[in-house]
Image (cartoon, rainbow, N blue to C red):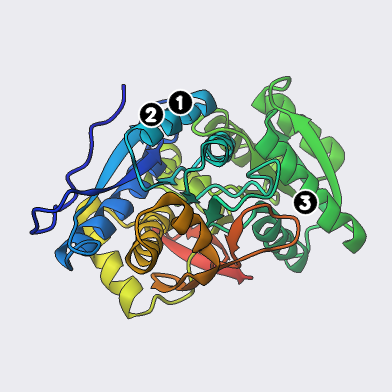
Amino acid sequence: MNAPSSPSGAARTDGSPVRIGALVPLGRPGWIEAGRHLLAGMELAVREVNDAGGIVGKPVELVVRDTAADPQRAATAVDELERLGVAAVAGEYHSVVARAAAARADALGVPFLCSSAVLDSLTERPTEWVARLAPAQSHGWQVYADFLLDAGHRHIALAAQPSVYWASGARILRDHLAPRGGTVVEFDMNALTPAALCDALVDHRATALLLLVGHPEPAVSIVKAVRHDRRLAEVLIGAPAGQPEFAEWATSLGGDSAAIPFLRYLPERLGPLGARVETALRERLAEAPSFVAFEGYDTIIALAAVLRSRGTGRPRIAESWPSVEVEGTRGQIRFSRVPGIGVWQWAWAPVQVVDRDPAAPDRFRILHSG
């Protein structure tokens, strides 16, 4: 079922609202926790925009649609939002879903600002209609591969499930590690049990195992099996896609949740804007905000800058991506053309490799920055 329109702090004005479509995973099998954080960031930014007078005196209104990690559902939502007259569509966390939304937005001529999805090929062809805040997968995952090399890992195993996103990540890792003396072996977790995976890791003498699988399952079962296998006590478990970022990970795994490095897109220190937004998001979420919540906030701030300067006409918005320059929570946001990326891209949001501290799993340790 579609979520209702979000009130998100209507401005004190009688002007008709400027509508922005928001695509977020709020139902299973979508990553609900990521969707909740993404929406919280977007709603906070909308409230602040409206408290400051809206867009030329008109309030911004989010029209929220639940993608539930379903590409077809996302494409259908873009169709509906286009008919409802939204100025632009924003959001989405799951890469394969965002790709379907981007393709439909491009076909319909609706501006789409993607918040979190990282798949390089967000569109099949270059387009003026789509822009993205999150770093491309090739950029972030190469940073992760450098972290592995710096930590002395040359024999890498991948516990993977079939998907465009996981296959793309595996290819990036192989292409980056092989010229630097690294080897990568991939195990199909649709064919292996966690126990069988443990045996295979011993046989291949892997020093690091990366989780390219869904959460909570089979990721949780794999972590438990590896962590409780004495033969694998020295094997690093990693999760480049960021599964350990959310509290659900720590709840599911307890002490086993720590010391699993993952990618997140935050600077080492937040500036004044980021610190203020972090406090507000913590109050809204009743927990520490993830990097996804900051992505949601920055999405609306960037769109608001376009709407204020160029108006709410869709072609004018699409023309404006290269002229955006606005302070976000994680740095100055500008969009440009990046080789191999078919959309307007912020190059780049800050990239970190972090893990949960074994001494205090609610605390994160920065292991590497790129």
Badge 3: how crowded within 10 Å, few (<14), some, or many (20+)?
many
Q: Nearer the viewer, mark 1 or mark 3?
A: 1
Disc 1 from disc 2: Cα separation: 6 Å
Q: Report whether residue 361 is seen.
A: no
Q: Quadrant of the C terminus?
A: bottom right
Q: Position of residue 286 (x, y in %)?
A: 22, 52
The quadrant holding residue 179 is bottom right
Q: Position of residue 62 (x, y in %)?
A: 27, 45
Name the amino acid, label 3.
Answer: Leu
The quadrant holding residue 59 is bottom left
Disc 2, SS: helix
For the image shown, how many numbered marks are present on the structure? 3
Disc 1 from disc 3: Cα separation: 33 Å
Q: Taking 36 as reference, is 29 above or below it?
A: above
Q: Quadrant of the N terminus?
A: top left
Q: Taking 81 as reference, is 53 above or below it?
A: below
Q: Are marks 2 and 3 in contact (CB under 8 Å)?
A: no
Find disc 2 in the rendering and name its residue.
80
Name the amino acid, label 2.
Answer: Glu
Q: Are marks 1 and 2 in contact (CB under 8 Å)?
A: yes
Disc 3, SS: helix
Q: Position of residue 300 (x, y in %)?
A: 35, 58
Query: Tag 3 or tag 2, which sits nearer the N-term?
Result: 2
Residue at 46% of width from left, 42% of height from top?
92
Find disc 1 in the rendering and name its residue.
76
Q: Nearer the viewer, mark 2 or mark 3?
A: 2
Badge 1: how crowded within 10 Å, few (<14), some, or many (20+)?
some
Find disc 3 in the rendering and name its residue.
173
Name the amino acid, label 1.
Answer: Thr
Q: Are marks 1 and 3 in contact (CB under 8 Å)?
A: no
